[in-house]
């Protein structure tokens, strides 16, 4: 297991630290572990880091929760991709606000050359179903990886159609990998994993599917 993993996970657990701020902290401090060794006064010298955030970083001590997360990762054979390391989606590296950490369960290559993301309404119509199916069936000959959000409606239709056409499909989740939301899509998620697809999230386990996560 990665010796620095506990610090990578810990940084994602600090309220107010998103992708942009996390990368800034790592860059200015000289490393992920160094972030937790800095004094509050030093953190305040970093552009964009205010007193509240600096205090939150310095006061973070919940490494028991971090160790619990590492145990969950090991038990469930979850891969963890850090934004500077191999395995992390190359396309996402170009997004300034991309997460520093991704939790991944599955076999699909997140850096596959051809990836199609499908998004749409949760209240899908019959016309919407037919068009979604038509589009995915039409591109299936190119063997793309189909990515969607495993939600009701268009997302579920995209995943199902991908499976029907022997395409790998990955669900991007707005919660931890310890659950599937909506519960109705648990069989679909299971099938995706069985067919060499995957599930990916930038949230630690026990993170609920709150609206702001989607």
Image (cartoon, rainbow, N blue to C red):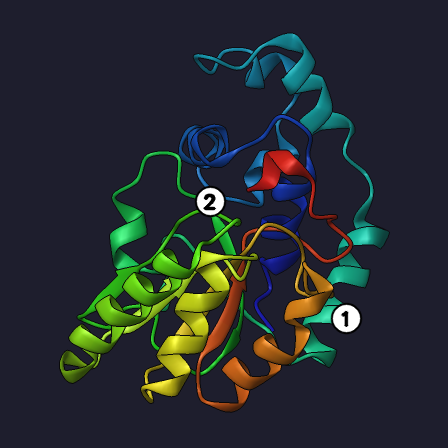
Looking at the picture, how far across and down is residue 129, in whole percent?
A: 39, 63
In this orientation, which residue lies closer to the viewer: 56 or 195?
A: 195
Looking at the picture, how far across and down is residue 68, in whole percent?
A: 81, 62
Of the residues under marks 2 and 1, which one precedes in the sequence? 1
Circle 2 packing at 10 Å, graded few (<14), some (14-19), many (20+), is many
In the displayed structure image, the side of residue 74 where residue 47 appears, left or right = left
Residue at the spot x=44%, y=71% of the render?
A: 159
In this orientation, which residue lies closer to the viewer: 14 or 109?
A: 109
According to the picture, the residue beneath numbered tag 1 turns out to be: 71
According to the picture, the residue beneath numbered tag 2 turns out to be: 99
* 168 vs 20: above or below: below
The alpha-carbon separation of the residues under discs 2 and 1 comes to 21 Å
Looking at the picture, how far across and down is residue 201, in whole percent?
A: 55, 57
Quadrant occupied by the N terminus: bottom right
Outermost left residue: 142
The number of discs equals 2
Circle 1 packing at 10 Å, graded few (<14), some (14-19), many (20+), is few
* 175 vs 213: above or below: below
Whether tag 2 and tag 1 are in contact, CB under 8 A, the answer is no
* 162 vs 164: above or below: above
Residue at the spot x=74%, y=80% of the render?
A: 75
In this orientation, which residue lies closer to the viewer: 128 or 173?
A: 128
Residue 55 can be seen in this image: yes
Outermost front residue: 126
User: Which mark is drawn over residue 142?
Assistant: none
């Amino acid at each position: 297991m990665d010796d620095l993993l506990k610090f990578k996970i810990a940084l994602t657990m600090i309220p107010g630290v998103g992708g942009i701020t996390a990368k800034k902290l790592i860059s200015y401090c000289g490393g992920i572990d160094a972030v937790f060794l800095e004094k509050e006064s030093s953190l305040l010298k970093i552009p964009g880091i205010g007193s509240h955030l600096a205090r939150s970083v310095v006061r973070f001590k919940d490494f028991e929760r971090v160790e619990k997360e590492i145990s969950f990762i090991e038990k469930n054979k979850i891969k963890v991709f850090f934004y500077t390391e191999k395995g992390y989606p190359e396309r996402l590296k170009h997004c300034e606000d991309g997460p520093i950490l991704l939790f991944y369960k599955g076999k699909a290559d997140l850096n596959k050359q051809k990836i199609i993301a499908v998004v749409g309404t949760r209240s899908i119509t019959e016309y919407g179903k037919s068009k979604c199916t038509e589009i995915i069936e039409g591109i299936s000959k190119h063997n793309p990886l189909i990515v969607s959000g495993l939600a009701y409606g268009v997302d579920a239709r995209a995943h199902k159609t991908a499976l029907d056409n022997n395409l790998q499909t990955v669900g991007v989740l707005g919660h931890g990998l310890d659950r599937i939301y909506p519960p109705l899509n648990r069989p679909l998620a299971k099938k995706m994993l069985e067919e060499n697809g995957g599930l990916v999230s930038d949230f630690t386990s026990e993170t609920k599917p709150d609206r702001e996560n989607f």
